[in-house]
Image (cartoon, helix red, strand yellow):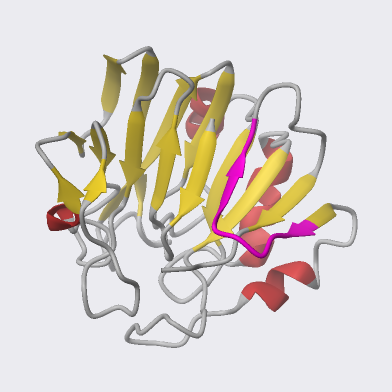
Amino acid sequence: MNIKWYGHSTFLFTAENGLKILTDPCGPGYGYTLGGIGADIVTVSHDHGDHNYLAAVAGAPKVLRTPGVTQEGGARITGIATFHDDAEGRKRGKNLIFLFELDGLRVAHLGDLGAIPPEDVFDALGKLDVLLAPIGGTYTIGPKEASEIAGRTCARVFIPMHYQTPQLRLGATLLGIDALLKISKGCKIHKLNQSEATVTPESLGEDRLLVLDYTK
C-alpha cells in the first residue's frame, strides 16, 4: 500500500488493486493545497472545515462519516466512535477513528481524537501495523498520548499528523514534530524528504516512527 500525505490529517491510501482511499480532506484557508484528488472512498472523522472538504475530491467517491463496517473494493473499513475532546464531546463534539484492513495490513487513522479512548476502543483496534495519530495538542491528543496509543496497539509504524508545520494556519499554534521526536528515543526514526511511502507486511519492521514531508 502506498501512503501519501497531503498535510494535516489528509492521506491518500492506494491499495495494490488500485483502490484509493482519502482521509479527512483539509479545506482551503488552512495552508495546504488540495484539489482534484482521485479517490474511490473518502473518510471524514468529523465535520470541521479542516477535515471534511469534499470539494477536493474528483468524481463521486463513497463518503464514510458514521460508525460501522463497510466492505468495498477488497478493503474492510470500520468507523469507531470516540470524542474530539477530553469531556465526552461537550467541548468539540464527536470524532471517528477509522480502521482500514487491506493489502494484509491493519491501519488506523485517529482523526481528531481528543483523549486516550476507553478499553473497548482498544479492543476494536487490536494490534496495528500502521497508526496515523495527531500529535499537535490543543485540539487533539499530544505526543505523549499518541505514543501511549502506539504502544498499546503494538503499532509497528507510527506516522504523526495534525501538527504545526510552516504551512499550517489554524486558530492556535500546535506542537511541532520536534515535541514528538524528543520523547521517541526508543523508536527507529525515519524522516523522509518526500510526502509518500510504500508499506507492505514484509517491509514494516518494528517500532518505526515515519515522518513524511509535506509537498504541494
The image quadrant where one finds the C terminus is bottom left
**Residue 104: image location, x then y, percent:** 58, 16
**Residue 172: image location, x then y, percent:** 39, 87
Q: Which region is colored magenta?
A: 190-199
**Number of labelled discs?**
0
- Rendered image quadrant of residue 47: bottom left
At horizontal 80% and vertical 67% (from top left) the residue drawn is 183
**Residue 204: image location, x then y, percent:** 74, 32
Closer to us: 114 or 181: 181
- Rendered image quadrant of residue 12: top left
Closer to us: 110 or 10: 10
Closer to us: 63 or 93: 63
Looking at the image, residue 71 lies above or below residue 147: above
The image quadrant where one finds the N terminus is top right
User: In screen coordinates, is 180 left or right of 12?
Assistant: right
Question: From where the camera sits, is residue 83 visible?
Answer: yes
At horizontal 66% and vertical 65% (from top left) the residue drawn is 193
- Rendered image quadrant of residue 93: bottom left
Residue 156 lies in the magenta-colored region: no
Closer to us: 126 or 182: 182
At horizontal 16% and vertical 35% (from top left) the residue drawn is 61
User: In screen coordinates, is 80 left or right of 146?
Assistant: left
**Residue 176: image location, x then y, percent:** 60, 78
Question: From where the camera sits, is residue 118 visible?
Answer: no
At horizontal 70% and vertical 38% (from top left) the residue drawn is 152
Looking at the image, residue 192 lies above or below residue 174: above
